[in-house]
């Protein structure tokens, strides 16, 4: 069995190839029934009840090849990086990704998901309305071959991906609830900021020996905005502070004092005062929209963790036939 690559190369990240589609729509059929009807002369992969045709592959390769040559020049596909032509790497990435998508399609359809064609048409109408006001993008799509069928399959794959994500998260409901209860989304900290690394170490030693944090803030900290509050900067959510500071702040136990942390501002000695989880925010009456935003962040984190794991499990149970040699030339 072909071992499907779990990550898309840097080439394809730019174009979000997770939205590409395979030829078949959902049908409640058995894989063996499909195999009997397949014209293998036009097939590059079969994944249970899902078929990836040469036409599928050629369409996607043509679109992305035209896009890359548009941005990077006519010789881009022939250029060699790490001993491999860009065009050959693109073929392999598209092929692996199409097989991966077929695995996901088969999984969600076999678990009861059905694509609503009315939803696809509604989303396509919205997209057409947007393109009607964006002539540059519309012309570019025409140039590289992004037509109505291609866009509708993009929309379909987006719906399928959403269904896959929901199924992955539903299977991890206990872990999700545990994260809502234990994963810090905000942390309250105080700090002492100085320019001299030697002084920072001396302050840390004084704190370890029992000196008062607020007094040392008043004596040494150059962060004038927090001096009056004993160095406290209140609760900070993830993604709002400079990386070195934030990583340390969220890694500390409540009451723990960090070693000096260097940032572009100087050297910080940080103490964690309190943490808040999603459940804490709920109990404190936080705005519902904020709570949903934090829940979504946690869902994305959990999904990122289990996406590849789930896909590996799906692949291990699947009947996968691949014929990359048909398109590798």
Image (spheres, rainbow, N blue to C red):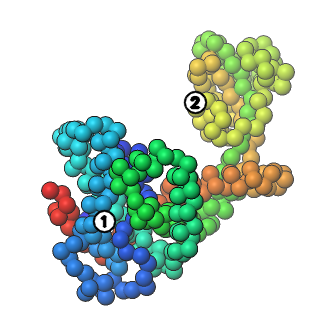
Question: What is the quadrant of the C terminus in the image?
Answer: bottom left
> Which one is earlier in the sequence, the residue at label 2 or at label 1?
1
Above or below, 232 relative to 31: above
Report whether 168 appears left or right of 177: left
Residue 42's quadrant in the figure?
A: bottom left
Residue 133 x, y percent position in the rendering:
56, 48
Residue at (26%, 60%) from the top-left corner? 58
In this rendering, does residue 312 appear at all? no
Residue at (74%, 18%) from the top-left corner? 223
Residue 221's quadrant in the figure?
A: top right
Residue identifier under label 1: 56
Residue 24 x, y percent position in the rendering:
37, 75
Above or below, 3 relative to 235: below
Circle 2: element type = helix
Query: Callout 2: 10 Å neighbours few (<14), some, many (20+)?
Result: few
Report whether 124 appears left or right of 315: right
Tell me, yes or no, whether the two marked residues, 2 and 1, touch with CB atoms within 8 Å.
no
Residue identifier under label 2: 244
Residue at (42%, 68%) from the top-left corner? 104
Which residue occupies the foreground of this view, 72 or 264? 72
Residue 123 x, y percent position in the rendering:
56, 63
Query: Callout 1: 10 Å neighbours few (<14), some, many (20+)?
Result: many
Which residue occupies the foreground of this view, 92 or 268? 92
Q: Nearer the viewer, mark 2 or mark 1?
A: 1
Residue 170's quadrant in the figure?
A: bottom right
């Amino acid at each position: 069995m072909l071992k499907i690559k779990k990550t898309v190369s840097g080439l394809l990240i730019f174009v979000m190839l997770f939205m590409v589609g395979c030829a078949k729509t959902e049908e409640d059929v058995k894989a063996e029934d499909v195999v009997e009807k397949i014209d293998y002369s036009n097939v590059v992969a079969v994944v249970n009840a899902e078929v990836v045709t040469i036409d599928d592959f050629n369409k996607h390769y043509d679109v992305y090849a035209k896009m890359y040559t548009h941005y990077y020049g006519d010789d881009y596909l022939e250029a060699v990086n790490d001993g491999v032509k860009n065009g050959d790497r693109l073929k392999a990435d598209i092929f692996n990704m199409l097989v991966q998508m077929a695995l996901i399609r088969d999984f969600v359809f076999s678990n009861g998901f059905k694509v609503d064609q009315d939803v696809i048409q509604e989303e396509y109408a919205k997209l057409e309305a947007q393109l009607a006001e964006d002539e540059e993008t519309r012309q570019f799509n025409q140039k590289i071959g992004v037509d109505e069928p291609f866009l509708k399959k993009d929309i379909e794959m987006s719906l399928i991906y959403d269904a896959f994500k929901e199924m992955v998260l539903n299977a991890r409901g206990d872990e999700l609830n545990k994260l809502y209860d234990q994963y810090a989304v905000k942390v309250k900290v105080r700090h002492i900021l100085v320019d001299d690394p030697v002084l920072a170490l001396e302050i840390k030693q004084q704190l370890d020996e029992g000196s008062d944090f607020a007094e040392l803030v008043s004596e040494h900290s150059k962060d004038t905005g927090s001096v009056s509050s004993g160095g406290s900067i209140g609760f900070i959510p993830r993604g709002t502070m400079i990386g070195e500071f934030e990583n340390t702040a969220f890694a500390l136990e409540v009451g723990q004092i960090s070693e000096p942390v260097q940032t572009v501002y100087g050297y910080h000695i940080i103490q964690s005062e309190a943490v808040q989880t999603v459940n804490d925010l709920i109990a404190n009456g936080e705005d519902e929209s904020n709570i949903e935003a934090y829940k979504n962040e946690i869902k994305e984190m959990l999904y990122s963790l289990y996406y590849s794991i789930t896909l590996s499990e799906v692949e291990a149970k699947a009947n996968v036939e691949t014929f990359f040699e048909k398109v590798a030339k």
